[in-house]
Each structure stands twice: as structure tokens, then as C-alpha cells.
Amino acid sequence: MKYDEFTIGQVFQTKTLKLTKEDILRFAGEFDPQYMHLDEAKANEGRFNGIIASGIHTLAVSFKLWVEEGVYGNDVIAGTQMNNIKFMKPVYPGDELSIKVEVIDKKTTKKESGIVTVLLSTFNNKEERVFEGELSVLVKR
């Protein structure tokens, strides 16, 4: 979609993605090697009673599902910023995530482009919000 086709308040819904224990271990092993993501015995004794996905993993999955919807298509130029990132609840192996995306702001930058800001709200299969963040993207007009 081009910049002018977006409207504030517009809402999109993504497909779902189920995170497996193997997904969580693989991501954490490479990008967030902390015990709550990798060490099952220690994680079972901790606050979350088991392995949880890295918040950065949850953010990455949220971004992936939104991009795969194809709304920006070839009209996207580049991401410009992310703000107000909140990890609200842990994501466990077997959780199935989906994202509600709402257009919350638009700013014209040049005759040929503008910045669209969306609020990504990620939910697990229990309909609990697990992540929220604002994403701004430069889009062709």
C-alpha cells in the first residue's frame, strides 16, 4: 500500500505462528543466551516456571508476521524507528502468536514519501497481550 492509502485507525490482523521449544532455544542460543531461555532446570526454578522466549524473539516474530501480510509490499522504503517497546507477558513453548496492527500516525516527509506509524499488539492463543510496540516506516506516496 502506498502512504496515501493508509488511514489513522485502520486495523490489520496477521496469521498466527506457533513457537516451539526448539525455536526458542535456537533463537536464544544465538541472540539472547540467558538462562530463562536456555537452561530448563534453572528456568523451572525461576519466576516463570519454565523456559520462555526472549523478548527480542517475540519482537522479531511480531515484525515477521506483520511484514508477511504484504501490506507495505514494494512501497516500503525503510523502517525509521521503533518506540514504546513493551514485553507484557512471557511467551512459552507452544504459544501461538498473532498480531493486531493499527495505524496510529502518518507524516508526510517529501512529495514522494511519508512515514506511517503502526502499533503492533501481539497476543498469545489465550488472547493475552504479550508484546506491544510502535513501528514507523517510510513508504512511497
Image (cartoon, grey):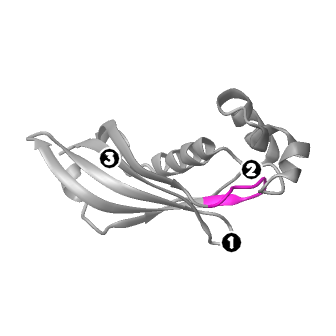
**Image point (58%, 60%), residue name:** 88
Q: Is residue 4 left or right of residue 52?
A: left
Q: Main secondary structure of the magenta part?
A: loop
Q: What span is colored magenta in the figure?
A: 89-97
Q: Which residue is mark 1?
A: 126
Q: How many marks?
A: 3
For mark 2, give the secondary structure: loop
User: Which mark is first along the chain, 2 or 1?
Assistant: 2
Q: Can you tell which of label 1 and label 2 is closer to the viewer?
A: 2
**Image point (82%, 52%), residue name:** 46
**Amino acid type, mark 3:** Ser
Q: Which residue is mark 3?
A: 136
Tell me, yes or no, whether the highlighted magenta stretch contains residue 66: no
Q: Which residue is mark 2?
A: 52
Give me the C-alpha separation between circle 3 and circle 2: 28 Å
Which quadrant holds residue 32? Answer: top right
Give me the C-alpha separation between circle 1 and circle 2: 16 Å
**Amino acid type, mark 2:** Ile
Give me the C-alpha separation between circle 3 and circle 1: 28 Å
Q: Are marks 3 and 2 in contact (CB under 8 Å)?
A: no
Q: Residues within 10 Å of mark 2 (few under 14, many from 20)?
A: many
Horizontal and vertical percent position of residue 134: 39, 53
Q: Residues within 10 Å of mark 1 (few under 14, many from 20)?
A: few
Q: Residues within 10 Å of mark 3 (few under 14, many from 20)?
A: many
**Whether residue 1 is visible:** no
**Image point (77%, 57%), residue name:** 48
**Amino acid type, mark 1:** Lys
Q: Is residue 128 left or right of residue 12?
A: right
User: Which mark is first along the chain, 1 or 3?
Assistant: 1
User: Which mark is first along the chain, 2 or 3?
Assistant: 2
